[in-house]
Amino acid sequence: MTVEISSVLLYLAIFLVVAKLGGVIAAKFRQPGVLGELIAGIMIGPFVAGWISQQLFGVPLFIDLNSPAGEFVSVFADIGIILLLFLAGLSIDVEEFKKSEKSATLVAITGVITAFLLGFGVAFVSNWTPMQAAFMGAVLAATSVGITVRTLMDVHRLHTRVGMTVLGAAVIDDIIAIIILSVLAGLAFGGLTFLGLAENLALIAIFFVAVIYIGFKTLPRVLTFVGRLHVEEVTLSIALALVFLIGALAEKVKVAAITGAFIVGLVISKAPVAGSLRTKISTIGYGLFIPLFFVEMGARTDFGALAGVGLLALALVGIAMFDKVFGCGMGALLGGFSGKDSLRVGVGMMPRAEIALVIAAIGIKAGIVGPELLSITVMIVLVTTLVTPLLVKIAFRGTPPAKG
């Protein structure tokens, strides 16, 4: 397939400009940048730009992700989500929420189980296949760490017992969601039997143990050593090489590449170079690659696909607002929180974003689900992202702010 470089450059320019415009507008309304990027993608896709140009000029003019240039940009977008998960691993400070480890684990587990079962059940009774319903359950499983943390910081409640529990639980249930995603990806792309699934789970376990065990012992030392070499940005290049190498290995054993990227970040998060790597990866990622993923997700959104599943979409959006409040709240109660604080924990765990979109995208690329899953997922992300800051402010009203 021949790709014209001029078309690719034009697409990249459009994606980056609308991504940052969306981010600016989102910031004006005190919303996360991901929300603006998603909406920007929707605006330049067939649902908005295509419809408007059809009405005005009689010809649909929009970003076509099925064109050679669109497919090329999609590769950049895939790199963006790999970098995002690498950053997520790099940013985890295990010590910071170690004191709330037990309660955070309970909150994460009860929240994931509740969300997955409710999503699976509603999709299944709506005549989705078990595999399709499993992807819907997985979409609901993961809380967005970034949105949660930013919201709690805005209301000055992050460094409280509730805030640390929410932070810890959000990280843990993202890890659980990544494991669920890995299993679903193996089933979707590998056509596994029961025996095959057992073998795949064994490969996943070996992959995790080997990469984490060897990684913690060697990767920080490797990066420290190469940092002494007099080559410009050699540490950054080697870190990226490790991310791509482990990501490729992860794909080979039917684990998503983003899982490998996350593990690499986690392994080197305590290395002396982790701070500088976070800054550089953040610059590269948010300057070019990461926004492409969310704009692409928005551009792929076809709300016309909701025509036949309108009631299901509304039901799932309602569940997305209820499942974490109930499930995570129950976990908080079991962890020793009061009723009011348990409600606060549940509200803080409500938003979904990156992982949910990744799960939907993989389900679509595997041919398991249709575009309606992405459209429903985007609706869930939009609604939960918009309502969480307001509900968190209401939930914490009357409580003293954190001293730290």
Image: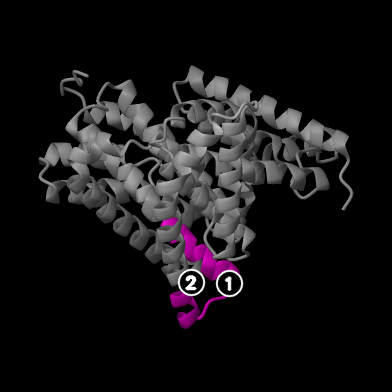
Locate residue 184 relative to residue 1 in the image: left or right: left
For badge 1, the amino acid type reads: Gly
Q: Residue at x 20, y 34 (%)?
A: 162
State which region is magenta: 177-200
**Counting other residues with Cα less than 10 Å from the Cα at mark 2, is it few (<14), some (14-19), or many (20 or more)?**
many
Q: Where residue 2 sits: x, y (%)? A: 89, 49
Q: Where residue 231 sits: x, y (%)? A: 65, 28
Residue 200 badge: 2
Task: Report if residue 306 is visible in the image.
Answer: no
Asked if the residue under mark 2 is in contact with the one under mark 1, i.e. CB atoms within 8 Å, the reply is: yes
**Res 9 quadrant in image:** top right
**Res 155 quadrant in image:** top left
Question: Is most of the magenta stretch helix, strand or loop?
Answer: helix
Locate residue 293 relative to residue 347 in the image: left or right: right
Q: Residue at x 47, y 69 (%)?
A: 203
Secondary structure found at label 2: helix
Which residue is disc 1 drawn over? 190
Q: Is residue 222 magenta?
A: no
